[in-house]
Amino acid sequence: MKFIRKNIFNALLLIMLLVIVFVPDAKAFLIRGLMEIGFYSPEVEHPMASTMGLNGIQFKDLKGNVIDLGDLKGKVIFLNFWATWCPPCRAEMPSINKLYAQFKNDKDIVFIFADADGDFAKSGKFMSDRKYEMPVYKVESDIPEKVFTGALPTTVIFDKQGRLSFRHEGVANYADKKIVDFLNKLKNTK
């Protein structure tokens, strides 16, 4: 009897582990739980503030409009690279959506959510199925490695002068008060 119970327990544990490994939403759910208890808090105490030219870094939206980061001087830019198949990206999406909802009507902050795959049909459906309001873009030009090396998710924030002020590879809780305060600080700095 003990042998059977032990085998059932081991089988259930193995099944649960396989689900977490192979089902992106299950892995995202686990990561999101870890975010809620304080893991994955982005470090913003020491902003980078390195200068770089943003001209020529372009993204295209669902309607075909192209946005050049160089044209956004005078605005804070929140740029997130993600993919629908990426569990850490899925895990941080609710926190990013919450941050976006807080600042979406602020004319001093621009949000760009760049689908690394560039598949508008898939990413648009992903956003609408989850009732996320964030605007989806795809990359239309070369992206400097200082901004994006290919790791998903990657989030970068540029200040009003176009300086790289924050860069984070990996999952993070962007609804965190530190990020909100950081964006407000950048927005209110000339």
Image (cartoon, rainbow, N blue to C red):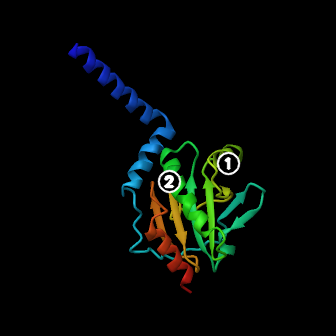
Question: Which image quarter holds the N terminus?
Answer: top left
Residue 15 at least partly seen:
yes
Q: Left or right of 120: which side holds 154?
A: left
State which tag comes first along the sequence, 1 or 2. 2
- The amino acid on which the numbered mark 1 sits, given as a three-letter code, is Ser
Question: Which image quarter holds the C terminus?
Answer: bottom right
User: Residue 112, percent across and down?
Assistant: 63, 62
Q: Residue at x 38, y 50 (%)?
A: 34
Q: Left or right of 42: which side holds 123?
A: right
Tag 1 secondary structure? helix
* In front of the other: 50 or 136: 136
Residue with the mark numbered 1: 128
- The amino acid on which the numbered mark 2 sits, given as a three-letter code, is Glu
- Classify 10 Å Cα crowding around label 1: few (below 14), some (14-19), many (20 and above): few
User: Residue 57, percent across and down?
Assistant: 64, 65
Q: Is residue 62 above or below residue 175?
A: above
Quadrant of the rendered structure where residue 78 is?
Answer: bottom right
Q: Residue at x 48, y 74 (%)?
A: 182
Residue reaching furthest to the bottom? 190
The disc placed on residue 92 is: 2
